[in-house]
Amino acid sequence: MLEVDVPNRRISLGMKQAESNPWDLVAAKYPKGMRITGKVKNVTDFGVFVGVEEGIDGLVHVSDLSWSKKTKNPLELFKKGQVVEAVVLNIDRENERFSLGIKQLEKDPWFDVEQRYRLGMTVSGAVTNVTDFTLASILILFTMYYLFKEGDAAVEQVKALLPLSKKDKDAVFKKSRDVIYATLYGGVLVSVLQGLGGGLIFWILGIASPIFWGSAMALLAFLPVVGTPLVWIPAAIYLFLKVSYIKAAILVIVSVFLLVFIDTFLKPMIVSGRTEIHPLLLLFSILGGMKVMGFIGIIAGPIILSLALTIIEIYKAGYLDKTV
């Protein structure tokens, strides 16, 4: 009997309370570091649930699956009913949480890394991963090579497949060509301006190697928003640690102004002047392209926008104007 409610004439009973709570003895039965074996009960995006005993499931969080591999989807590695071995990491009696780890079955490779590898030591190994940026850069290089080599033939084939008049086809490709040129030229001009501005402020503030840092900012300026901060934020921290608070504040204020003004206002104005696309739409297309396609979206986003606007113009000229 759990509760008696006389006014409402109700008596609450419980069946599980007639048995001992398995969580009362679980901490003593499964000490930290103990290895256990159980079946996978469920697999989610954040981890794997393993049956420890009747009424108790332990969670192997996705971060505790492997030392070396970043598992994005545990469903690729585990399935229900699979027998696995794990190590007890922690038991929260009050919240009835049982934490397990699979990677702890092996030794942490970072445990004695400083003793095994010394500074200046020559090592060899196999490439195990390629970053998205590196992969995108390789794809861009190959794509540009074949576009320069066979681009005209590919354009003619695409033109032949479009169900449009010759005038409309030429309009579509002219618009796309203008967007590509404007985006590339705008990107180069913006990177040069940010590099010059960054190098100049570094020189004024007395930071060593202003030409080198200005060149680095010019290269990184092709990455909107996050590019140049990779240079001036560490420089501002360096000045702050040297107790040069005024110089650090000047660097941050000027750099933020250049970043916001050039990336948010100047670049869209340069590109939109050639493409006749509103700067706000162009800014959204660049940010949206990068969100979906990464670095290559800087060019792909405006191209998709220009194609959409051109198709709308063709539709208006060929259909709406005739129905009015």
Image (cartoon, rainbow, N blue to C red):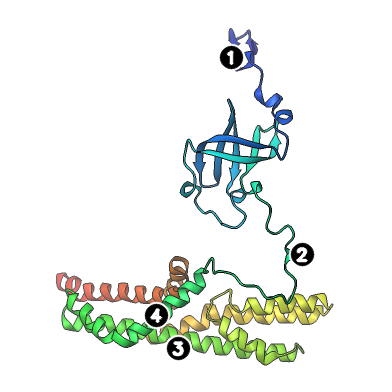
Specify the amino acid type for callout 4.
Phe
Residue at position x 72%, y 91% in the image: 203
- Quarter assignment of residue 160: bottom left
Q: Which residue is mark 2?
A: 115
Q: Amino acid at mark 2?
A: Gln
Q: Which residue is mark 1?
A: 15
Residue placed under numbered mark 4 in the picture: 142
Task: Kindly check if marks 3 and 2 are in contact, taking CB atoms under 8 A apart as contact.
Answer: no
Q: Residue at x 61, y 89 (%)?
A: 215
Whole-angstrom CA distance, mark 1 to mark 4, is 68 Å
Sooner in the amino-acid sequence: mark 2 or mark 1? 1
- Taking 5 as reference, is 184 above or below it? below
Front position among marks 3 and 4: 4
Say whether marks 1 and 4 touch (CB < 8 Å): no
Q: Give left or right: position of 171 versus 66.
A: left
Q: Helix or strand or loop: what does disc 3 sit on?
A: helix
**Could you tell me the amino acid type at mark 1?**
Met
